[in-house]
Image (cartoon, rainbow, N blue to C red):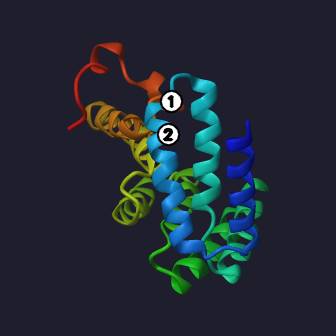
Amino acid sequence: MILHSLRLLWVSMLLAGTVAAEPARDALLDQRFAELKQAQDEVTARGIEQEIWKLWMISGNTEIDGLMRQAMEARRWGDYAKALALLDQVTGIDPEYAEAWNQRATIHFLRDDYEQALADVARTLQLEPRHFGALAGRGVIRLRQGRSALAIQNIKAAMDYHPFLRERHLVPSRFLDQPAE
């Protein structure tokens, strides 16, 4: 319990900008990914997953973090054009910020622009190869495109990082024992 409280305090300090964001964020992400891979149950995995998502949303730049909050709010209200414009600003300021590309991919997916979503997923994965959300998202897009074999590969690759991934139910059980390609 104390360890969990310390983690939450550390994440809040990162969010508040009181700790050097980039190295601390990267170290915490490495630790969380190791914990996620070893999670013994879904409840534990979901808690770690939420911490990872919070860390991904930290850019280390207050302007970018503000734009990201605005983009998420616009998406929440279904204003995809505004969200995309804000995310375009973010990627213009910092083209190395993986989560901005992932969120762009999500907006394109919501607009049924699968090819652009796949391009943004590819950029996300160049910057953060462990991004289980982007990998799973690519799998869902491939399913919608009728490309089941690729979808299964993508979702299984995401499960290498997150064994309790929500999209795991999309993979037929006969494929779960085979390694991802």
Numbered disc total: 2
| Residue that mark 2 sits on | 35
Indicate the secondary structure of the residue bearing disc 1.
loop
Residue 153 position in % (x across, y down): 28, 36
Q: Amino acid at mark 2?
A: Glu
Indicate the secondary structure of the residue bearing disc 2.
helix
Query: How far is the residue under mark 1 from the one under mark 2?
Result: 6 Å
Q: Nearer the viewer, residue 120 or 113?
A: 120
Residue ID at (34%, 36%): 151
Query: Residue 72's image quarter?
Result: bottom right
Residue ID at (57%, 60%): 56
Residue 152 position in % (x across, y down): 32, 31
| Residue that mark 1 sits on | 39
In the image as oriented, which residue stretches furthest toward the front?
2
Residue 171 position in % (x across, y down): 38, 24
Residue ID at (70%, 71%): 82
Left or right of 102, for residue 130:
left
Disc 1, disc 2: CB below 8 Å? yes
